[in-house]
Amino acid sequence: MSTRDFLVELGTEELPPKALKTLSTAFEGEIVKGIRDALGKDAAELMGKTVVKPYAAPRRLAVLIENLTEEVPASTTQVLGPPTKICYDADGNPTKALEGFARKNGTTVDQLGEVNGKVSFEQTTPAKPLTNLLPGIVEHALAKLPIPKRMRWGASRVEFVRPVQWLVMLFGEQVIDCEILSVKAGRTTRGHRFHHNQPIELGAPGDYADALLNTGKVMADYNLRLETIRSQVVAEGEKLGGVAQIDDDLLHEVSSLNEWPVALTGRFEERFLDVPAQALISSMAEHQKYFHVTDADGKLMPNFITIANIESKDPQQVIEGNEKVIRPRLADAAFFFETDKKKTLESRIEQLKTIVFQKDLGTLHDKAVRIATLAERIAADMGEDQAKASRAAMLAKTDLMTDMVYEFTDLQGLMGYHYALNDGEDKDVALAQNEQYMPRFAGDELPQTAPGIAVAIADRLDTLTGLFGINQPPTGSKDPFALRRAALGVLRIIVERNLNLDLRELLSVAADSHNNLKAREGLEDTVLDFMLERFRAWYEEEGIPAEVFLSVLAVRPTRPLDFDQRVKAVSHFRSLAEADALAAANKRVSNILTKQGADSNAAVNEGVLQEDAEKALYSALNGLQSTLDAATAEGNYRQVLESLASLRGDVDRFFDDVMVMAEDEAVRNNRLALLAQLRNRFLAVADISVLGG
């Protein structure tokens, strides 16, 4: 089947830079999906040799598909109708059911057949040009783009993310005759707004990228543009004798702002380096989209790298213009820093009463008091200084009252650290101001100081209990207060910092610190269940099967570190040769005990034991008792399960030789008590019956 190249390009005013990559990916995906749907069952074969190339620049979204089939092949579909027995009356005449089926399929009764007792019709769809379908596919793809808010321009009723200026639709050398978003398709694209602000006529789809690059001064390939910017920025840093620091988010944003990137290096006064480096970095990146440079020791250099969207004949003028713009920004940061230092964090505590955290949960001051109470308890459980934890908690939100954090919100915590040091606060208390927000994202570093750990945990638990307590838990994909992330952060801190903290006890303290929670009853258990469930994704990432996680969740340990140790022990147990048999035995025991309503704590009467197999199992269990007790007390769950694995032979013999449901009630109950004792030993670690599926 013959093929052609297909190109669609939508030209617009400058697209939102932070959304450009997402829009490009979605546009490509929807077009490919639309074509596959149109080709039906033959799509995989017909598109086996196609090559899809997306393009995205500030003023354009485009997709080039090479070797695209020219037509949708003919197809035959068998449509089944009503049973034949209701299709003819007693005289053999067609019934209304049969006639209706024929009309529905655009045929006559004599053209119908029969398959497996039902009337059938073979519907043939003739081959048709794909060209006729492409406008609809593109239109649908544009309608499906993830655009939160569409706009209209002029008197037009057309809605899109930005005003549309031109449309290219080529199938081979042929222009596809159509109109999309009120713009008629053609073969003319446009070059760079300044370097080549002229139309560029395309002869064929394959000319697209080269014509824009060589004639139009537009680097349409998003990834090529991104890597060009990266290499230019790195080179500029090396010229300075430093290292250019490239933040991925900033790199993507800059790549979405420029069609013809040119890296230039500027300088600012060294006096600004007295301001905390991150404040300067935030100002340069957030407001001006500049990359910063550090020296060999990692210290900020008085330079910046900017990306111009033009190849200037006099780049020095561009550099001087950027230096002129950044100077007042950095001066503002310096002014904020000096002004903020004149007032201590402690003096700002009272101001927290003016800021509402959540209408049902009080002010930031209320939250600070609650966090301080819980942080003290956490520090006590850790054996650390409670006064430092309390002090760090009361100061934790005060930097939100500073001018610097008001201007640069991403500096919260970090500026608290600098201001606390300036105030003469204890170093660990100062560090806790920044550590309270750790981890900020998956894989982020964790707090290191005891006050930082205590406040980080306390803050999250306060938020979790508060919002659950007013019946505002996460729902589906909506989690406006990032409670899932908060829960996982607490678990990471406790497990990775090796803290033997009881989460349920801490949740109870946190819940009691709130006033008038609507859902206070059982709140600690509700939040605990929510938090322990976060372990599921954690272990999935580590390659631990869900059944291992579920076996531990079944016994509901309330200490996250203990939970983690159990999971690792069960994961090891699964690798033992005895695991499957013992898991199956535990499942059988569980079913028996549940069905009989047996007392799980009943004692075994040795004198009532009759069969050798039950005596052997009882003896083996008793022989392991001291080992199991010691290992369980130490949290050495791996040793517990390895020891219990040695019982496999005795367990197998018991079920082979012993009738549990003996007629003698005393014997029966004694055997049930023995099985309960066996199961309880496993339940001290996990419910391994879950491993049996």
Image (spheres, rainbow, N blue to C red):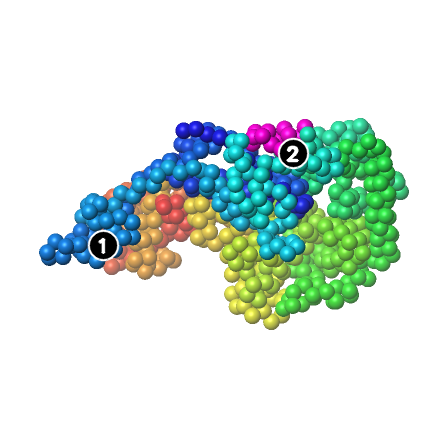
Q: Amino acid at mark 2?
A: Ile
Q: Which range is magenta?
A: 200-214
Q: Which residue corresponds to mark 1?
A: 99
Callout 1 secondary element = helix
Q: Amino acid at mark 1?
A: Glu
Give left or right: position of 537 versus 646: right
Whether residue 176 is visible to the viewer of this picture, yes or no, is yes
Q: Earlier in the sequence, mark 2 or mark 1?
A: 1
- Percent from the top left, x then y, of residue 623? 39, 44
Residue at (84% x, 44% y) in the render: 325
- Percent from the top left, x then y, of residue 674? 33, 52
- Number of marks in picture: 2
Classify residue 348 by image quadrant. bottom right
Please give the label number shown on residue 108.
Answer: none
Callout 2 secondary element = strand
Residue at (75% x, 57% y) in the render: 400
Classify residue 254 by image quadrant. top right
| Residues under numbered marks 2 and 1 in contact, where contact means CB atoms less than 8 Å apart | no
Residue 654 drawn above or below residue 676: above
Q: Which residue corresponds to mark 2?
A: 200
Residue at (55% x, 61% y) in the render: 473
